[in-house]
Amino acid sequence: MSSIKSPLPAKDTKAVTRALQTVLVDLIDLALLGKQAHWNVVGPHFRSVHLQLDELVDAARKHADAVAERSIALGANVDGRAETVAADRTAKPMPEGELRDTDAIHDVIERLRMIVASTREQMRATEEPDPPTQDLLNSVLLDLEEQLWMFEALAA
């Protein structure tokens, strides 16, 4: 823990900041996955997929910052190092190299579903000990599910 004193009891702080760390890792990973696909996507739907991936990355980065700052405000230190993200990620890595637009869409959908499920789980873990954190995770979830919908619509 950091030198910041949490307003929550120690037991609740530990549970809530553990949930926030899980979501933070997933959001950092999602931003990296999105950029990997963004840089390597090819095909007839390149432009729309390329632009949608940028929106996904922007959302993931914005929420990662909010989640990290919430955790720090609760007295925890956050860990967004590459080795931590690689070790603790929920989703599997993106394929290496050129990525057909249809494959990119399906790969992102698969990973978003994993991260959405994990975020829902972390929301449940924060419901009782810290409703404000649950609200924050709800806003993350709303954006992730909107992104999932956008990619699923591209796949239809």
Image (tube, rainbow, N blue to C red):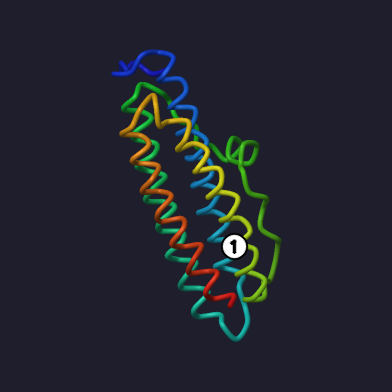
Q: Quadrant of the C terminus?
A: bottom right
Residue 48 drawn at (x, y percent):
49, 79
Residue 6 % position (x, y): 32, 18
Outermost residue on the top side: it is 10
Residue at position x 40%, y 58% in the image: 58
Is residue 50 depicted above or below 66 in this figure?
Answer: below
Disc 1 crowd rating (10 Å Cα; few below 14, some 14-19, many 20+) is some
Quadrant of the image containing the N terminus: top left
Amino acid type at image mark 1 = Ile
- Quadrant in which residue 20 is drawn: top left
Secondary structure beneath disc 1? helix
Q: Nearer the viewer, residue 84 or 108?
A: 108
Q: Is residue 30 above or below residue 17?
A: below
Name the residue tied to disc 1.
Answer: 109
107, above or below 4, in the image: below
Residue 75: x and y, percent? 36, 21
Residue displayed at 55% across by 67% down: 38
Q: Is residue 63 above or below residue 5?
A: below
Q: Residue at x 35, y 34 (%)?
A: 133
84 or 148: nearer the eye? 148
Between 40 and 25, the residue placed more toward the observer is: 25
The answer to whether residue 152 is left or right of residue 51 is right
